[in-house]
Image (cartoon, rainbow, N blue to C red):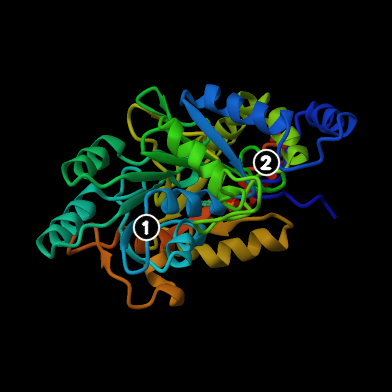
Amino acid sequence: MTNRIHLSSPHMGGTEQKYIQEAFDTNWIAPLGANVNGFESEIAQFVGIKAASATSSGTGAIHLALDLLGIKTGDEVFCSTLTFIASANPILYLGAKPVFIDSEPTTWNMSPQALKQALEEAATEGKLPKAVIVVNLYGQSARMDEILALCEQYDVPIIEDAAESLGSLYKGKKSGTFGKLGIYSFNGNKIITTSGGGMLVSDDEELIARSRFLATQARDAAKHYQHSVVGYNYRMSNIIAGIGRGQLEVIAERVAQKRAIFERYEAAFSGIDGIEMMPELENTFSNRWLSTMTLDPSKIKIAPYALMEILDEANIDSRPVWKPLHMQPLFEGCKFYAHSKETVVSEELFATGICLPSDSKMTVEEQERVINIILNIL
Ligand SMILES: *Cc1c(COP(=O)(O)O)cnc(C)c1O
């Protein structure tokens, strides 16, 4: 039996254990220490932002971001619909109501057209959202210029969910640095990983300082244990941060590997009518975290799920595109704004999309095995 080919598995660079050893040598086995401080400043420097705060997960970072913006019970928060559940779960943690915004075809991300309609209606009803969570799917940046202009017009802050897009660019600027707050994830399958962890970033240093306070149980400045607001236990451990520092040293290499994987798929499938690879918007640079394509059902005989099954039998991982959140039982009854009257772009992408194995440890020969199986079926 051949080795299983993974979708995206942890890929260590080699120096991670040096940082972990330092934590042991100095006995900083805690949610603070040199690795946490170092990882925060190295991420801030890498993405070009003033401040960063390391968290125990990307989900925790989104929760903190919403809390920092004052989101409370009954508030509305707009969120991209085509994303992983973690983008929206923290809205529910705070008792707020998510409103989902469709995708558009050039980025698969939030449709400015749908967002505009949602904001106009909200303004008419006198109930603007308290925040907009914009996701950068599979490494591709959303249409940030249009989205930023709309949110500025209505004075609504953006939280950029860049969990999948660390290392990506939009018009030369790093993904995750466009909103009031941005978040990254270092879960096991992400482009770099700490086994689990996240980062909250902002140019507002006071907000980031407050996020550290909230993430450590919101303890007031008193000698005794005194608390005036709800806090969390969301800080990253100094051991985990050591893995992150080692991983950050190889991010450029990982992005290059992911992009090379995408380009090999693109070249192999370019002659097949009915296969579309995920687009890359002009003036953006995607980290190509997952290589993703759609199969046009009028031209390709096999359905995405049947193809995924055949790949699985050949010991190859693949995944459907995220199931849109407005279709999830958990969010039944939530408001949703489609890209247009004729098309719900996210639903089409969900019905026709496949995430191909995009493991940076995959060899060229292994990728050829994947490609040949797909070419044979088609
Ligand atoms: C992975 C992911 C998250 C959550 O990150 P965790 O670190 O796993 O909590 C949030 N949003 C998106 C889009 C993700 O892919």
Closer-to-camera residue (164/98): 98
Residue at image point 70% right, 46% down: 9
Element at badge 2? loop
Q: Residue 193, which numbered label?
A: 2
Quarter of the image for residue 32 reads top right
**Is the CB atom of the residue marked by disc 1 within 8 angstroms of ligand 1's nearest atom?**
no
Horizontal arrangement in the rendering, residue 87 relative to residue 107 (left or right): right
Give the alpha-carbon distance from disc 2 to disc 1, as whole Å: 29 Å
Q: Residue 71, which numbered label?
A: 1
Residue 54 lies, with reference to residue 300, above or below; the image says above
| Residue type highlighted by circle 2 | Thr
Closer-to-camera residue (298/61): 61
Horizontal arrangement in the rendering, residue 277 relative to residue 234 (left or right): left
Nearer to us of marks 2 and 1 is 1
| Residue type highlighted by circle 1 | Ile
Residue at image point 33% right, 59% down: 77
